[in-house]
Image: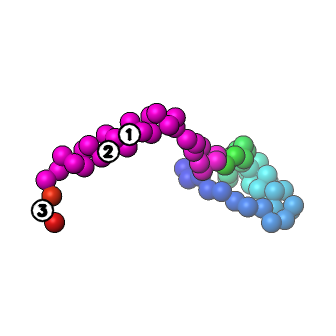
Amino acid sequence: MQTIVVELLNDKALSLLQQLEQLNILRLVVTKPQIDKPKRQWAGSIPKASARKMLEYNQQSRNEWERNI
Protein backbone atom coordinates (compact mmCIF):
# COMPACT_ATOMS: atom_id res chain seq x y z
CA MET A 1 0.00 0.00 0.00
CA GLN A 2 1.22 3.52 -0.76
CA THR A 3 0.42 6.77 1.02
CA ILE A 4 0.39 10.08 -0.84
CA VAL A 5 -0.60 13.62 0.03
CA VAL A 6 -3.16 15.34 -2.18
CA GLU A 7 -4.01 19.02 -2.21
CA LEU A 8 -7.65 19.59 -3.08
CA LEU A 9 -8.15 22.45 -5.50
CA ASN A 10 -11.91 22.14 -5.75
CA ASP A 11 -14.73 21.22 -3.36
CA LYS A 12 -15.90 18.57 -5.82
CA ALA A 13 -12.58 16.75 -5.46
CA LEU A 14 -13.38 15.73 -1.89
CA SER A 15 -16.73 14.37 -3.00
CA LEU A 16 -15.04 12.31 -5.70
CA LEU A 17 -12.50 10.94 -3.25
CA GLN A 18 -15.25 10.00 -0.82
CA GLN A 19 -17.03 8.12 -3.63
CA LEU A 20 -13.82 6.23 -4.37
CA GLU A 21 -13.57 5.36 -0.70
CA GLN A 22 -17.10 3.96 -0.76
CA LEU A 23 -16.07 1.75 -3.69
CA ASN A 24 -13.15 0.45 -1.59
CA ILE A 25 -10.67 1.84 -4.08
CA LEU A 26 -8.91 4.07 -1.59
CA ARG A 27 -9.08 5.11 2.03
CA LEU A 28 -9.09 8.71 3.19
CA VAL A 29 -6.81 9.35 6.12
CA VAL A 30 -7.25 12.64 7.92
CA THR A 31 -4.03 13.93 9.45
CA LYS A 32 -3.45 16.75 11.86
CA PRO A 33 -1.60 19.71 10.37
CA GLN A 34 2.00 19.75 11.50
CA ILE A 35 3.07 22.78 13.46
CA ASP A 36 6.51 23.99 12.46
CA LYS A 37 8.89 23.96 15.40
CA PRO A 38 11.06 27.00 15.85
CA LYS A 39 14.34 26.51 14.04
CA ARG A 40 16.34 27.95 16.88
CA GLN A 41 14.75 25.90 19.61
CA TRP A 42 17.93 25.75 21.66
CA ALA A 43 19.09 29.31 20.97
CA GLY A 44 20.16 31.30 23.98
CA SER A 45 23.17 32.18 26.02
CA ILE A 46 25.24 30.37 28.60
CA PRO A 47 26.43 31.81 31.89
CA LYS A 48 29.56 33.95 31.65
CA ALA A 49 31.47 31.71 34.06
CA SER A 50 30.80 28.65 31.89
CA ALA A 51 31.76 30.56 28.76
CA ARG A 52 35.01 31.71 30.35
CA LYS A 53 35.89 28.12 31.38
CA MET A 54 35.15 26.88 27.87
CA LEU A 55 37.34 29.57 26.30
CA GLU A 56 40.18 28.82 28.73
CA TYR A 57 39.98 25.11 27.96
CA ASN A 58 39.90 25.85 24.23
CA GLN A 59 42.97 28.07 24.47
CA GLN A 60 44.78 25.49 26.61
CA SER A 61 44.08 22.71 24.13
CA ARG A 62 45.30 24.90 21.26
CA ASN A 63 48.52 25.61 23.11
CA GLU A 64 49.14 21.88 23.56
CA TRP A 65 49.43 21.28 19.81
CA GLU A 66 52.88 21.42 18.31
CA ARG A 67 52.80 23.80 15.39
CA ASN A 68 55.37 24.19 12.64
CA ILE A 69 53.78 26.78 10.45
Relative placement, left or right, of 58 versus 41 is left
Quadrant holding the C terminus: bottom left
Kind of element beneath mark 3: loop
Tell me the tag on residue 7.
none
Horizontal side, residue 31 vs residue 63: left or right: right
Quadrant for residue 11, please give it: bottom right
User: Magenta residues?
Assistant: 37-66
Q: Does the stretch in magenta take in 6?
A: no
- Which residue position holds label 3? 68
The residue located at (54%, 50%) in the rendering is 1
Q: Which residue is mark 1?
A: 54
Judging from the image, what secondary structure is the residue with disc 1 in? helix
| Residue at the (70%, 59%) spot, across then down | 6
Q: Amino acid at mark 1?
A: Met
Task: Give the label on residue 58, or none.
Answer: 2
Query: Dot 1: few (<14), some (14–19), or many (≥20) neighbours within 10 Å?
Result: few
Q: CA distance from mark 1 to mark 3?
A: 25 Å
Q: Residue furthest right?
A: 11
